[in-house]
Image (spheres, rainbow, N blue to C red):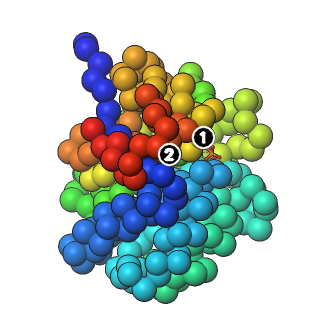
């Protein structure tokens, strides 16, 4: 099967990227309620802070916020994704606490995944037998091509039943809990964000379609769209001084 290249946009900074994201969120809000899953990691932090600064421009009360993945650590831990998302975004916006859905950290790793899956099925409206559909899933990407907590070579990449899975990968510091590909690929839109020159190689591989084996390359929403949101450093074919936001292809 011939691989296809993926669309991307290049932004001069997190402010412009946040503007793009905010306008997408405003479109989602027009439908009434929006279900959004947010990524952890370092890359989205400035983006979340910018979104929080635009607080008044977004009807946050219409959104339900979930996490893409979580590290198996207590919520106050420095590596907790929820802690980062709370501090950079949630504490700065007016959103009812019942619309915020962190991944629960239970005694057993497997229970965290089971409980979160139950929560997804309860909160996100779905037709009988169908997958819950997120309006937007925001993903990051690692230099090895992982996305969410879906790592190269992990059998969870082939998961078909579970919406949420526990991850025990010896290559990473903490056990994780992650949304699986079936739920990611059921989303209406998926934005994959990257920043910095160290990501340029893997982004090139993913965008060109030359590495269909990479976890990030397996993100392909069936009925929706996916888009890479990049800075100049991580962009394939980086050209200095490109005009703001003009990299859409
Ligand atoms: C996490 C993630 C993960 C992350 C990438 C990129 O919990 O770490 O959700 O998929 O997005 O590892 O991380 P950085 O943004 O820190 O480079």
Q: Of helix, strand and loop, which one carries label 2?
A: strand
Give the mark nearest the N terminus, 2 or 1: 1
Q: Of helix, strand and loop, which one carries label 1?
A: loop
Left/right of residue 138 with respect to residue 53 in the rendered view? left
Residue 157 is at least partly visible in this image: no
Residue drawn at the location 73% of the way across and 36% of the way down: 172
Left/right of residue 15 with respect to residue 46 in the rendered view? left
As measured in the structure, the alpha-carbon distance from the residue carrying label 2 to the one carrying label 1 is 7 Å
On the image, numbered disc 1 is attached to which residue?
196
Residue drawn at the location 30% of the way across and 27% of the way down: 5
Residue 35 point in image, percent of width and height: 36, 66
Q: Which mark is residue 94?
A: none
Left/right of residue 14 with respect to residue 198 in the rendered view? left
- Which residue in the rendered view is the most extreme toward the front? 241
The one of 185 and 41 positioned closer to us in this rendering: 41
For the residues labelled 2 and 1, say whether their Cβ atoms are less than 8 Å apart: yes
Residue 228 point in image, percent of width and height: 40, 42
Residue 58 point in image, percent of width and height: 38, 79
Residue drawn at the location 49% of the way across and 64% of the way down: 15
Quarter holding ligand 1: top right
On the image, numbered disc 2 is attached to which residue?
231
Residue 242 point in image, percent of width and height: 41, 43
The one of 78 and 118 positioned closer to us in this rendering: 78
Residue 233 is at least partly visible in this image: yes
Q: For the N terminus, which image quadrant?
A: top left
Residue drawn at the location 40% of the way across and 53% of the way down: 244
The answer to whether the beta carbon of the residue marked 1 is less than 8 Å from any atom of ligand 1 is: yes
């Amino acid at each position: 099967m011939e691989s296809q290249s993926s669309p991307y946009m290049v932004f001069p900074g997190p402010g412009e990227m946040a503007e793009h994201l905010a306008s997408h969120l405003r479109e989602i809000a027009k439908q009434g309620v929006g279900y959004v899953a947010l990524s952890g990691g370092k890359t989205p932090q400035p983006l979340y802070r910018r979104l929080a600064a635009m607080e008044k421009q977004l009807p946050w009360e219409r959104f339900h916020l979930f996490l893409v993945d979580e590290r198996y650590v207590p919520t106050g831990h420095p590596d907790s994704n929820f802690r980062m998302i709370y501090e950079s975004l949630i504490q700065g916006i007016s959103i009812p606490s019942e619309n915020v859905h962190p991944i629960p950290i239970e005694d057993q790793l497997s229970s965290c995944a089971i409980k979160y899956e139950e929560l997804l099925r309860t909160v996100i409206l779905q037709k009988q037998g169908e997958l819950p559909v997120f309006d937007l899933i925001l993903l990051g990407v690692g230099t090895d091509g992982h996305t969410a907590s879906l790592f190269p070579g992990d059998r969870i990449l082939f998961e078909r039943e579970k919406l949420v899975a526990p991850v025990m990968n010896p290559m990473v510091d903490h056990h994780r809990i992650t949304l699986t590909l079936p739920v990611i690929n059921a989303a209406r839109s998926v934005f994959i964000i990257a920043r910095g020159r160290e990501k340029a190689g893997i982004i090139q591989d993913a965008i060109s379609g030359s590495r269909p084996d990479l976890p990030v390359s397996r993100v392909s929403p069936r009925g929706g769209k996916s888009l890479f949101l990049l800075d100049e450093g991580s962009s394939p074919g980086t050209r200095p001084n490109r005009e703001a936001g003009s990299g859409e292809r």
